């Protein structure tokens, strides 16, 4: 890193664990953290995807990048994942709770088991991982948790009620964890993503015929976001540049979607 103003963004020597780290926002975040100097553990359920991402990130950045296959909706697996990372690297400094996904279903016909799975993945998993990581983060000189949330958790989205409710809960989990753990030196923040053009999102848009470009004309920036733009915010929150920020949810969504009464152009 260049000395001076950029020093506070440097993550050299820190160990980061990214759940859902093989694709999309998780993958982009992992690579940026590595470029800033962190060594990495990528967690997820698809071993082949994780290994490919780890190999490519390691080759591109020169940082150590290992994989930890795990289903983070299982508390025991989440705890074993954290223990494995601590065994491999000797400690853990940064936890990115990125694993998440929403399934579309009207409330009137949503099966209860689908609701439970959505909440398990988008809320409970972050709790399991954060609780498991606490013992490591509290002894780190810069323990950080960043939860990847969504605008759906702030305003709600019809058709994804379980996802919206879970992400809203994730943002409150962020606030409470920050309040309880701040005096022990652990910062906890969230990033609420808007319409981000991940490979999975693009595939879903194509499948359903959703026109993201047209829909995003209502955003001040008038385009979907990129995973790398979310990663920049996550990397900032993980760094010493954000040392006095905790308990916050930062929106990365192309600006507020406001309606007006007159033409302002």
Image (tube, helix red, strand yellow):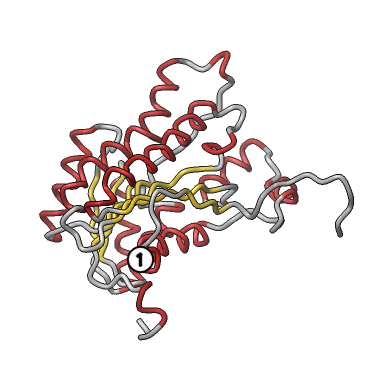
Q: Nearer the viewer, residue 46 or 137?
A: 137
Residue 181 at what x, y percent from top left? 26, 47
Q: Nearer the viewer, residue 8 or 64?
A: 8
Q: Is residue 174 above or below residue 22?
A: above
Q: Which residue is mark 1?
A: 239
Q: Residue at 31%, 49% (x, y): give it.
A: 48
Considering every residue shown, the one lying at the far right of the view is: 262
Q: Residue at 55%, 54% (x, y): give it.
A: 252
Residue 53 at what x, y percent from top left? 35, 58
Q: Residue at 40%, 79% (x, y): give it.
A: 6
Quadrant of the image for the C terminus?
A: bottom right
Residue 107 at what x, y percent from top left? 56, 18
Instruction: Please count the marks in the image.
Output: 1
Apparent side of residue 227 relative to residue 124 in the rendered image (left or right)? right
Residue 231 at what x, y percent from top left? 45, 60
Considering every residue shown, the one lying at the far front of the view is: 183
Q: Is residue 192 above or below residue 155?
A: below
Give SS at disc 1: loop
Pointer 1: residues within 10 angstroms few (<14), some, or many (20+)? Answer: many
For residue 73, what is the image quadrant?
Answer: top left
Q: Is residue 214 above or below residue 13?
A: above
Q: Residue at 30%, 72% (x, y): give it.
A: 37
Quadrant of the image for the N terminus?
A: bottom left
Apparent side of residue 93 relative to residue 150 in the rendered image (left or right)? left
């Amino acid at each position: 890193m260049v000395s001076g103003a950029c020093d506070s963004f440097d993550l050299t020597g820190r160990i980061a664990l990214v759940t859902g780290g093989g694709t999309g926002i998780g993958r982009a975040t992992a690579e940026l953290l590595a470029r800033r100097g962190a060594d990495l553990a990528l967690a997820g359920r698809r071993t082949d995807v994780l290994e490919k991402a780890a190999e490519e990130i390691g080759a591109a950045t020169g940082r150590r990048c290992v994989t930890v296959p795990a289903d983070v909706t299982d508390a025991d697996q989440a705890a074993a994942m954290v223990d494995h990372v601590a065994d491999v690297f000797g400690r853990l400094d940064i936890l990115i709770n990125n694993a998440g996904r929403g399934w579309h279903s009207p409330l009137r016909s949503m099966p209860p088991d689908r609701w439970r799975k959505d909440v398990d993945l988008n809320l409970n998993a972050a709790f399991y991982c954060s609780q498991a990581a606490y013992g490591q983060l509290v002894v780190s000189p810069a323990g950080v948790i960043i939860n990847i949330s969504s605008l759906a958790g702030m305003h709600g989205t019809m058709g994804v009620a379980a996802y919206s409710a879970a992400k809203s809960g994730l943002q409150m989990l962020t606030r409470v964890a920050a309040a309880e753990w701040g005096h022990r030196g652990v910062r906890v923040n969230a990033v609420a993503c808007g319409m981000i053009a991940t490979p999975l999102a693009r595939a879903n848009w194509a499948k359903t015929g959703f026109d993201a470009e047209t829909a995003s004309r209502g955003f001040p920036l008038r385009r979907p976001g990129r995973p790398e733009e979310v990663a920049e915010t996550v990397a900032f929150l993980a760094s010493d540049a954000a040392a006095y920020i905790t308990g916050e949810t930062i929106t990365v969504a192309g600006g507020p979607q406001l309606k007006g009464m007159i033409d302002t152009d």
